[in-house]
Amino acid sequence: MATNAQSPRLARPEPRGIGWSLLLTLPIAVWALLMLFRPGMDTDPKSRIAAALTALFMTALFFMMMRTGNTYRWRRLFFVSVGVLFPVGFIYNIVSVRGTMGIPVEEMIAGRTPFCFMPIPLLILPAALTRKLVFPGSIGPGGGASGAGMAAMVGIWLAMTLVLGKGWCSYACFFGGIEEGVAAIPARAKIRKIDPRWRHGPWAVLLAMVLLSLALFEPAYCMWLCPFKAVSEYIAARNLIGLFQNAIFVLLFAGLVIVLPFLTKKRTQCSFFCPFGAFQSIFNKISAFEVKIDKERCKPCVLCQNACPNMSLTRESIARGETLMSCMKCGACVDACPRQAVVWHIKGTEIAWKPERARLMFLYAAWAMAIMFGGTIIYGGVATILHFIA
Amino acid sequence: MKLRPILGYTAAGATIFAAVLTPFVLMGYFANGVAALPLHVDEVYSGGPKARTIQMGAYSIDVHRPVHPHFLQSEKPFVELEWTPVSALPRHVSDMVDIDGDGQPDICVSFDVPNDPKAPLRVDVEPLNPHYQAMHSVGKEKFSRLIVRVDNAILVRVPLVNP
């Protein structure tokens, strides 16, 4: 690996040779095949083609990360694919099962409402105080269009949170990819100055939704504020209240996921609104990996601050040599720094001590999770598209 | 090498190990752990536990325990009745139901059973006991006041008069 003559230990690797990159990619290729051709996956030819395409896609992206030393650009391709293909597979699935995108009361009473990760923080207080889950799903298998219940989703979330911390929002969330894709479209941001107080928005929404869910005994965020109801499933509008709820979903989606990301080049729903993102920030504390800033190398040019898609860097945090706890470990700031002052870091080690090793260790863990969870979503979307083409 | 870096690398290695274990062990371990917790879905959705069954010849009516909403929950207290199996029901059902098991009928429930399982249902409930509210041509208004078909059963939820 080539090194910088001034400070060998801080050097960003030159593009790796193809052989080295292939060698480093080999474990991920094996993992992708293991995950996408595991027992229980559909075995018809179209599904096999979808699995092969997904395995190839995920392996190729990891290879490019190894070859170029760049993380963000290739991760974004994966993440946007998940964001775009999730609604394709999900909507096809629920329409096949129940004939509509709306959630009928019958399905709620039968405990078959699909459970995503968003309501998890809202269920904790009611469950702790009354032992009741305020969600019309099933705890065990049998719930939702996927057949999985709440326990399965919570199990996946717990295991992945242990590995990724807040990295969930960059490598696992199946909603954030849409706004990240929209934010990537314009060459420049139309709105550049954003009041930093908006950064507290997710915490405010989280607090309000947790208290409301306890008081109203319903998953308040899902009932009233989730922008992604617009691209997954909505509340069947049986009356004026239902119409009002659906209007809120569509307006929030249009504003926070389409218009504002386009104008600001930021993930505005994640940065200013998402209560789950705020909740997930707490788990950044238990992660072994983080992004740090080498204060000796940094000439505060704020390129990293500008590149951060969810405003997790401020002048103050840069001066302290760290990101805010909302950092999603997407790698945008690391890739943007021309002085290689922003680095991947393993807690407990000296800052900028073998940052490429820290990056590799994080990426192996994160990409394994990305293939297992996001890869399966991409596979589902591709299989659906192939089904329609054929 | 100092202790902190050793601990840091150990945690980083453990993270990769956890990632490998996740689909095979960890996910199932956590999911089973959550499923084993003494939690259940709120009864406003699930309808509450079954109290007893009334045999009506070819079909039966399951009477559930009354459900009382919490805090500011926007539902009234209700009791759920379940006619099953749908295939054994006549074209028009009109049953007197003894909900509290005291030997006296509490309500008279009547509804049509269409052949099309997706056809909308309407129910009339005449209270014979002042604890229960009347319903006239009610469909799917609220969780506490409805008639729906779920799989092979027809569910009627009758609101209770507030004490």
Image (tube, coloured by chain):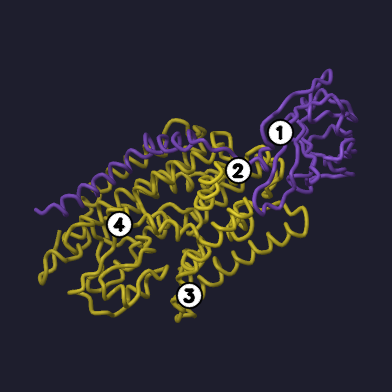
- Labels 4 and 3 share a subunit: yes
Q: Is the residue under label 2 in contact with that under label 3 (CB below 8 Å)?
A: no
Residue B113: image quadrant is top right
Determine the CA span between mark 3 and mark 2.
34 Å
Chain that appears purple: B
Question: Along the line of sight, which residue is nearer the eye, B63 or A80?
Answer: B63
Question: Along the line of sight, which residue is nearer the eye, B163 or A54?
Answer: B163
Residue A297: image quadrant is bottom left
Chain that appears yellow: A
In the depicted structure, whether residue A337 falls above or below residue A29: below
- Subunit of label 4: A
- Labels 2 and 4 share a subunit: yes
Q: Residue A65, labelled with which disc?
A: 4
Mark 3: amino acid: Thr
Question: Along the line of sight, which residue is nearer the eye, A239 or A209?
Answer: A209
Q: Is the residue under label 4 in contact with that under label 1 (CB below 8 Å)?
A: no
Where disc 2 sits, the SS reads: helix
Please state if B75 lies on the left or on the right of A28 as rendered: right
- Labels 3 and 2 share a subunit: yes
